[in-house]
Amino acid sequence: MPWQLILIRTQMAKTVGTLLFTLILSGFSVPRCGATVYHSNGSVANVQALHNAALNGDTITLPAGRFSWTARLNITKGITIQGATTISGPASNPTINNGTIIQDNTPRSGSSVGIIAVTLNPSQSFRLTGVTFAPGISTTFPLGDGAFRLHSGGASPNTSMRIDHCHFASLYQGKLIWVNGWVYGVADHNVLECRGNSIPFYVWHNAYGGANQINGNGSWADYPWYGTEKFFFIEDNTVIRINAVAARSLVDTLFGARWVVRHNYLQNVIPEGHGTEGSAPRGNRADEFYDNTVNITVLWGGGGQRSGTSFWHDNVFTGTASSTGSHCSLSNFRETPSRPDPVWGIADGTSPWDANDTEGNRTFVEGHLPFLFNSGTDTSSVNSRGVIHDSTKNWAVNQWVGYSIKNLNLTDAYGSYVISNTSNTITYFYYTGTDTAGRYLIFNAGDRYEIHRVLIMMDQNGRGKTDQIVGVPPINTTTGRASWPHSALEPCYSWNNVYTRTNTALGFDAPAQQPTTKLNIDYVNLGGGFPADTTPAVVSSRYTAALNGVAYTGTFVYPHPLVTAQP
């Protein structure tokens, strides 16, 4: 609005005139539609003060230049923050003009770590656009989740959060964009350069279904909703892991996460997600990964998915070939001692949360005890780390492959799946990671063992919608106790994923002796040759409304509606 018009209004009403004159001196302007644009000086203190005075729908601009932020910006208003950085061109070769540069000198510990924290209710909107974030003086990675946090809780989701055209320039932050609570939205047209083990995107849906739905239980009790808006979208970004020695996470997940990654250029990053394992949080729920260019220049063996269901299709893989011939490995960590915790128990054929063989013939009958196939005592002369001996046995070779063995002398009766056996030895998967708090599946001479079989693991890869689970310790509300939650079969599908150097179709794989995730049941590799960006009939015929919530006929509208909407 021209300043002359503002002065005319001051003559019409003394009170209004005084207010508008104050706004001019404060750097405010009055745009159309009743919203206000606040022009900050770029300091975090000034931006925070303007935010505190703003109303939903207002905008705060950041000027061109370089500014040191020494405190986190806390957003509780539905506003837009707009800088002068521009990003244009294709994701594979973007042009960046770093107009507004924020140096990250925020705290590295304590309750206020992070650069921007957004906490909104479902009716509010937020947009961060046109800002470059660069390292400051500190080279320490802070403790805590997320340099940029998008959070909303309540009885319905927030569907209007967007981060776009921002440059994340090798920040010393462990996790960059952290989406949690119950947020749908989009991150688009950003350039993220990731340092060390920094994770670009960290997605939770821990409040999905309402604020009382903790641990992602609400997300798991719902349909996958493929092809709809019920995901957080990551599209048209450039993500590069600098100085990489191995491919690492593009997106890490927990708490029933739902995400879509599409139309991005990705260098030395690949999706990886946690499963329902260890403590109470549920794992990754559902995801779609399509129309991306993945350029991995280091050794890699595929991404990692540890629970739930997914569609991977129409991705182009360049650079180094996957050492496994797979684009993603489907590992069920709870079938090993890698995340020992009494909440769910290890999926070794005895946990009440799994469908176990109760009759000895691959049959699960609710309420029946797990069938005991064999038992005995370890007669090894030394501690067994991956192999037990029982000189009293005369088993058929490999008759126990795909079963599980557990040590009854350990406090938590740890178990793991069997890889092979001879007439009197059993080789089991021995986890050597450092995340077991020093507790490993080791047999000492004289330790007692049992052999059981799990048929379907709760929340395993290729499984989805469950009964509603609540509380800690968790309870299945259908049965009123800890019990099998009737996980629906929701197969993972792969098609048109091509490694260009050899024109080879890539697909999912699973550990060879892992008991439960089966090819052409829990995951299906359809290969290549389908028309680009089409849905194979086998996918649409499986994912009807009865399984998906709505009939799946194709991907959600692209670009995302938040991208194409008017500012």
Image (cartoon, helix red, strand yellow):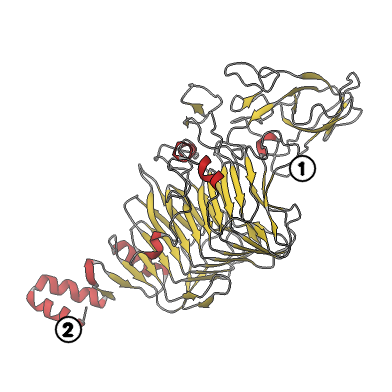
- Which image quadrant is residue 538 in? top right
In the image, residue 119 sits, relative to residue 404, either above or below, namely: below
In the image, residue 122 sits, relative to residue 75, either above or below, namely: above
Give SS at disc 1.
loop
Horizontal and vertical percent for residue 347?
Answer: 66, 30
In the image, residue 534 sits, relative to residue 443, either above or below, namely: below
In the image, residue 531 sits, relative to residue 274, either above or below, namely: below
Left or right relative to 411: residue 89: left
Q: Could you tell me which residue is drawn at 50 percent across and 41 percent down? A: 543
Marker count (numbered): 2
In the picture, which quadrant includes the N terminus?
bottom left
Location of mark 2 (residue):
4
- Say few, some or many: other residues with alpha carbon within 10 Å of mark 1 (under 14 / 14 to 19 / 20 or more): some
Location of mark 1 (residue):
432
Horizontal and vertical percent for residue 374?
Answer: 78, 19
Horizontal and vertical percent for residue 252?
Answer: 58, 51
Residue extending furthest toward the left: 12
- Of residues 526 and 143, the one nearer the viewer is 526
Q: CA distance from mark 2 to mark 1?
A: 73 Å
* Amino acid type at image mark 2: Gln
| Mark with earlier residue (2, 1) | 2
Q: Could you tell me which residue is drawn at 53 percent across and 33 percent down? A: 488
- Which image quadrant is residue 64 in? bottom left
* Amino acid type at image mark 1: Thr
- Which image quadrant is residue 154 in? top left
Image mark for residue 6: none
- Say few, some or many: other residues with alpha carbon within 10 Å of mark 2 (under 14 / 14 to 19 / 20 or more): few
Left or right relative to 165: residue 401: right
Q: Is residue 439 visible?
A: yes
- Of residues 295 and 472, the one nearer the viewer is 295
